[in-house]
Amino acid sequence: MNRSGTLSHARLCMDLRIAGPPAALSLRRLKFQSNKHYDEISMTGRCRSSSFEKDVGIECMEGLRPEVDHAVDRGIDNCLTYTDLGVGKKYEGKVRDTYDLGDTTIIVTTDRQSAFDRHLASIPFKGQVLNETSAWWMRKTTHIIPNALIDVPDPNISVMQKCTVFPVEFVCRGFMTGSTETSLWTHYNRGEREYCGNVFPDGMKKNEQLSHNVLTPTTKAADHDVPISPDDIVKQGLMSQEDWDVASAAALALFEFGQKEAASRGLLLVDTKYEFGKDPEGNIMLIDEIHTPDSSRYWIADGYKERLENGQEPQNIDKEFLRLWFRANCDPYNDDVLPEAPKELVKELSRRYIFLYETITGEAFVPADPDIPAQERIEEAISKYIH
């Protein structure tokens, strides 16, 4: 895909000729043997404790097209876990490998699934879902702000304009929720009523929708995100007031647009994060990813109000069960060698990423051909950028 939004490559994909995403999904029960105390994971991500040496259960999706299920089965042995393109300077992140080519960067989104600061497994088509979801949103949001995307020569690759990155993450929130140290609900539940320059009224409850969307920026410390107010961003010289005004307005506009698009597909875009930078001409641009299943929280809109009134957690397409399986079967922080995740769990997580892609975009997912070795495929795709 180029800046006009048209595809610029033969995608090396399976010719599925699918009319559209599934209309509905059902669930089936999978069970896995656990050798210790475990958590039982449901579609909503809620867990309950169970006893020693019993089955670990998970509600699994049914209803994806047979062609996609077949591709997942075949793709499990052809995941993109590691890249070595032999060009530029390589930066390896948790999921993305970035190659600096000078004026441009090549970003390869792999299938790595990480938690506990460790690689847990490789998930078929996860990288493709993240890369193509972000590209889909970038095509649709150029009326709000320019972005750095130049080309998508492969389902797992984005070629980006090199930018000078602002050292701030723009976290947009529409709901009072979260459980991490930087989440809005964590601070509110401690009695704090001002957070990152935003003031919140008394009497709010977890998962309640805010009266208006808010921006809660963070800046990077050594190994974690630190909340910061807009005033401090400018005072500390992280951004000029003018740059902050442009980028913050763009972030809120992108978020509002994303919420409307998500609502049209039965989803609530709860919160997300953006990154911005400047190109060599000084233009502020959206960089990195936008509205992907990993950078954003999505809830199922149907039944949200009823569940809120009943004190229940909103429904979502849970992706935490693999992390919880490792917690149940090893000490992921201290064990030298981790057990191999059950293949059915890995395939289930792949199905959920694919379902999220189709639900978010409203388009059918076309898997990259699992019969072509992933490393060989991406090397061919970027050949025009390195010769």
Image (cartoon, rainbow, N blue to C red):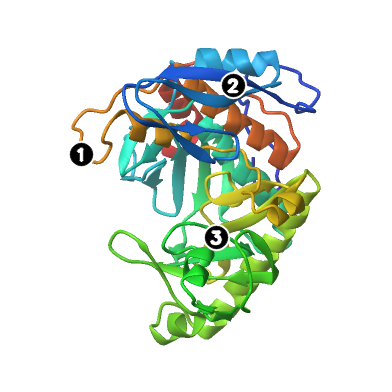
Looking at the rendered structure, the kind of residue marked 2 is Leu
Is label 3 in a helix, a strand or a loop?
strand
According to the picture, the residue beneath numbered tag 2 turns out to be: 12
Q: Nearer the viewer, residue 296 or 150?
A: 296
Distance from the alpha carbon under mark 3 to that under mark 2: 30 Å
Marks 1 and 2, how far apart in space? Answer: 41 Å
Residue 40 appears in the figure: yes
Which residue lies most toward the front here?
Answer: 51
Residue topped by disc 1: 334
CB within 8 Å, label 1 to label 2: no
Q: Earlier in the sequence, mark 1 or mark 2?
A: 2
Image x and y of residue 275, in percent: 51, 61
Q: Amino acid at mark 1?
A: Asn
Q: Label 3 sits on what residue type?
A: Tyr
Q: Earlier in the sequence, mark 1 or mark 3?
A: 3
Near mark 2 (Cα within 10 A), the count class, few <14, some 14-19 or many ≥20, is: some
Disc 2, SS: loop
Q: Position of residue 200 (x, y in %)?
A: 60, 78
Q: For the residues marked 1 and 3, what is the alpha-carbon distance in whole angstroms? A: 33 Å
Residue drawn at (45%, 38%) of the image: 108
Give the residue drawn at x 67%, y 44%.
136
Is 36 left or right of 376, judged from the image as shown?
left
Q: Is residue 278 visible?
A: no
Q: Quadrant of residue 274?
A: bottom right
Residue 350 location in percent, x, y?
54, 27
All told, the count of numbered labels is: 3
